Amino acid sequence: MRVRGGLAALLLAPVLALTVALYVVPLGVYLVNGFYRFKDGRILREWTLDTYRAFLTDAFSYKIVSTSLLLAGIVTALALVVGYPLAYALHTRVKSARARAVLAVVLFCPLMISVVVRTYGWLILLANQGLVNMTLLRLGVIDQPIRLLFNMQGVVISLTHILLPFAIFPIYSVLGNLDPSLKEAARDLGAGPWATFWRVTLPLTLPGVASGGVICFTLALSAFVTPQLLGGGRVQVLPLTVYNSTVEINWPEGAVTSVALLALSILAVWAVNRGLRRLPIGVRL
């Protein structure tokens, strides 16, 4: 056992060293800048909490945080609302293993394409003369094109599509691990299909829903490309603030904003984990 443990430690040592060198150290150096002062276009290496104080007392900072949380919340809710029925249908309606594999590949295909490419695709689809508006006009649903670009609506639509697989597969994985005898027992006790779903299937799949929700929320909260391209600078979120501050050499502001972004992500995981602890299933992330 000691030999195996030593061999495992020896194999992991280069990976850990590389992770520390390429990720932990640069991130730590960047975050240390949050305790420096930025003045007249220069970073003054004077230890101070002024940057944190300015961030916490600036109304615009709270507006950016609220916009980021609102965007992440809406995208997560839509991804789960759309993703759960798809995962459930994939599990219950598709009986052939080959057909399931094909559908899984189809759902995974968007992840093989760059986020930039997919965002530009939505940029074309959501334009005033794009496919979405033209289809709605021909169907008579609208009288004039709806503005779907350079606002929150376009960013939400694109991000929901991009993050949808991350909501589907955790739910599908949990559905695949459910004991079929539980549904049979519910039917034997007189429960119909809807009662079986609401009282057996849904509660048991809540860990998958929570996992998919956390993944989508954190990814949407940290999304940069889609808000930048489809938001057109009008959807101000935390990642864009970090980028703009870094480009302008205002590293203290960027570091403080990064800490806020990291704190919100950790808080989301903690809140979901705490909620799962209260469930009778007793499953945690």
Image (spheres, helix red, strand yellow):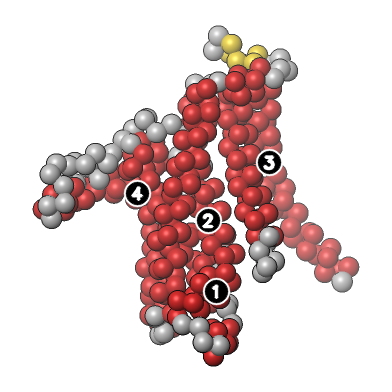
Q: Amino acid at mark 1?
A: Arg
Q: Which tag is nearer the camera, tag 1 or tag 2?
A: 1
- Counting residues from the start of the chain, the first of labels 3 and 2 encountered is 3
Residue 205 in view, yes or no? yes
Q: Amino acid at mark 2?
A: Gly
Judging by the rendered image, the residue that carries numbered circle 1 is: 199
Picture coordinates of residue 85, whole percent (x, y): 41, 68
x%, y% of residue 58? Answer: 55, 20
* Nearer the observer, 108 or 215: 215
Instruction: Report crowding for label 3: few under 14, some 14 to 19, many 20 or more residues within 10 A (C-alpha).
Output: few
Q: In front of the other: label 3 or label 2?
A: 2
C-alpha span from label 4 to label 3 = 34 Å
In the rendered image, residue 36, in percent from the top left (x then y), is placed at 67, 19
| Residue holding disc 2 | 213
Helix, strand or loop at label 2? It is helix
C-alpha span from label 3 to label 2: 27 Å
Question: Extreme front residue here?
Answer: 190
Does label 3 or label 1 sit earlier along the sequence?
A: 3
First-in-chain label (4 vs 2) = 4
Q: Say which mark, if any, is on residue 24.
A: 3
The reply to whether the C-beta atoms of the residues labelled 4 and 2 are less than 8 Å apart is no
* Image point (45%, 80%), residue name: 193
Label 4: which residue? 157
Q: Is residue 183 left or right of residue 89?
A: right
Marks 4 and 2, how far apart at CA: 17 Å
Q: Secondary structure at mark 1?
A: helix
At x 54%, y 12%, the residue is 41
